[in-house]
Image (tube, rainbow, N blue to C red):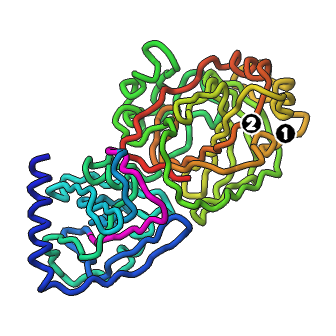
């Protein structure tokens, strides 16, 4: 902290010295919506040591609260952002927050090498600034001078303050995000690794309790190491979120369930290709729905008796999961049809005779939270696009209990947020 204060003091001194000698800021508007205006100082864009940096300013149209100090209010943010363009990650190293023209909060870290870069939520201010800076022409060997804040006041978004004072953990890009339960397999097993000339490795057993439970998943196999080492794990509790004016969710859910499968970990509905969700100008196909009792995610500390997770993948192996919460109430017609057609044996899919649509398990109000996370089962792969629908739908107590009897308490405990941004 002492280093940070020293660095911040030096930065201010450099700022006042440079007022008379540096060129004026050249602010360009990158985006404006009903909540804020995002601007970038084009003069400040420089490149050094394979990183680009720029000063970014955000003008808010309503008063914001500092997450670490709720009594501190601001409506202007200015940040020095560094961007790792090849990895598509960013980190803020200096933050200034203003209420009108008065500086009310500031923070910094003394060395960009100490910052931990995170992958921005698509279409957020982080992401827009990164896309602009990374698409700019590379400076020809321009050496970045000691960063000094531009004259115009500004400060950051809620979680940007946290990112500057406490280096946020990294979020891995999507890799092989196909879950272990997509195809029928031996009970309690993860997908085995095929090695040339070595045959098939014995599958690893995992569960929701005891020595094979969530607290030990990362120790069961090197394949599961992300369950312990990951910094963007799911599920999470939605306590705070940033109003990002998200676009309406685009879903196509006209094709029925193909078959139903009872595994040792979940009740799973499998789909043929045809149902999709469009996110970030990418098309994800619905592959399966898994049920968790009680819910894995919670909202402001409130858990729900049931959660359905709609798992989608694209042609590159990226994964997006849409989660729907259930509360006790009126019967859900889709669940009623499903419960009447359960397979008699585990790990043997049963074809549904009556038509069940994914849309029958979605609320009419599809406002949502969005964040980056992981699979909630081993191997806990990160880089998953999560969509959590805000409005729960209903199911009777008997329906919920019937699903719970199949896979009792198959919910992973809540994971640390680690500075991640949640937008709505």
Q: Residue 49: x, y in percent?
A: 19, 68
- The image shows residue 258, relative to residue 172, as above or below, that is above
Q: Residue 74: x, y in percent?
A: 37, 58
Residue located at (40% from left, 70% from top): 129
Q: Residue 337: x, y in percent?
A: 86, 30
Residue located at (47% from left, 57% from top): 121
Classify residue 218 as left or right of residue 358. Answer: left
Q: Residue 16: x, y in percent?
A: 12, 74
Q: Tell me which segment is drawn in magenta.
A: 52-69
Magenta region includes residue 390: no
What residue sits right under mark 1 in the picture?
Answer: 356
- The image shows residue 70, relative to residue 79, as above or below, that is above
Residue located at (51% from left, 47% from top): 384
Does residue 130 appear in this view? Answer: no
Mark 1 nearby-residue class (10 Å; few <14, some 14–19, many ≥20): many
Please tell me which of labels 2 and 1 falls first in the chain.
Answer: 1
The secondary structure type at the circle numbered 1 is: loop
Classify residue 254 as left or right of residue 223. Answer: right
Does residue 44 appear in this view? Answer: yes
Task: Give the foreground label among 2 and 1.
Answer: 2
What residue sits right under mark 2 in the picture?
Answer: 393
> Quadrant of residue 265 in the image?
top right
The secondary structure type at the circle numbered 2 is: strand
């Amino acid at each position: 902290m002492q280093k940070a204060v020293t660095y911040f003091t030096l930065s201010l001194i450099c700022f006042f010295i440079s007022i008379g000698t540096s060129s004026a800021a050249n602010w360009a508007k990158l985006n404006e919506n009903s909540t804020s205006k995002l601007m970038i100082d084009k003069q400040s864009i420089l490149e050094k040591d394979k990183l680009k940096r720029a000063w970014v300013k955000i003008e808010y149209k309503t008063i914001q609260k500092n997450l670490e100090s709720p009594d501190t209010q601001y409506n202007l943010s200015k940040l020095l952002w560094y961007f790792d363009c090849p990895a598509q990650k960013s980190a803020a190293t200096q933050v200034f927050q203003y209420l009108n023209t008065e500086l009310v909060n500031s923070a910094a870290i003394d060395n960009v090498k100490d910052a931990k870069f995170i992958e921005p939520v698509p279409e957020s201010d982080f992401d827009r600034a990164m896309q602009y800076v990374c698409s700019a022409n590379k400076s020809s060997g321009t050496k970045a001078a000691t960063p000094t804040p531009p004259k115009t006041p500004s400060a950051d978004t809620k979680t940007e303050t946290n990112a500057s004072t406490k280096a946020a953990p990294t979020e891995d890009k999507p890799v092989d995000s196909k879950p272990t339960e997509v195809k029928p397999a031996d009970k309690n097993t993860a997908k085995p690794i095929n090695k040339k000339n070595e045959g098939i490795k014995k599958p690893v057993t995992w569960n929701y309790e005891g020595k094979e439970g969530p607290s030990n998943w990362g120790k069961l196999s090197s394949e599961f190491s992300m369950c312990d080492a990951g910094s963007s794990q799911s599920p999470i509790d939605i306590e705070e979120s940033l109003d990002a004016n998200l676009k309406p969710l685009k879903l196509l859910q006209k094709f029925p369930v193909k078959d139903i499968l009872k595994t040792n970990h979940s009740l799973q509905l499998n789909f043929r290709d045809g149902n999709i969700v469009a996110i970030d100008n990418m098309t994800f196909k619905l592959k399966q729905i898994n049920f968790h009792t009680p819910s894995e995610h919670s909202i402001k500390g409130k858990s729900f008796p049931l959660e359905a997770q709609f798992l989608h993948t694209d042609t590159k192996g990226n994964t997006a999961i849409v989660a729907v919460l259930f509360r006790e109430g009126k019967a859900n017609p889709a669940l009623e049809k499903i419960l009447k057609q359960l397979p008699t044996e585990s790990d043997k899919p049963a074809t549904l005779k009556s038509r069940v649509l994914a849309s029958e398990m979605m609320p009419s109000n599809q406002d949502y939270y969005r964040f980056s996370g992981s699979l909630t089962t081993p191997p806990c792969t990160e880089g998953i696009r999560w969509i959590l629908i805000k409005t729960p739908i209903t199911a009777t107590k008997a329906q919920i209990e019937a699903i719970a009897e199949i896979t009792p308490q198959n919910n992973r405990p809540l994971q640390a947020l680690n500075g991640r941004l949640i937008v709505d």
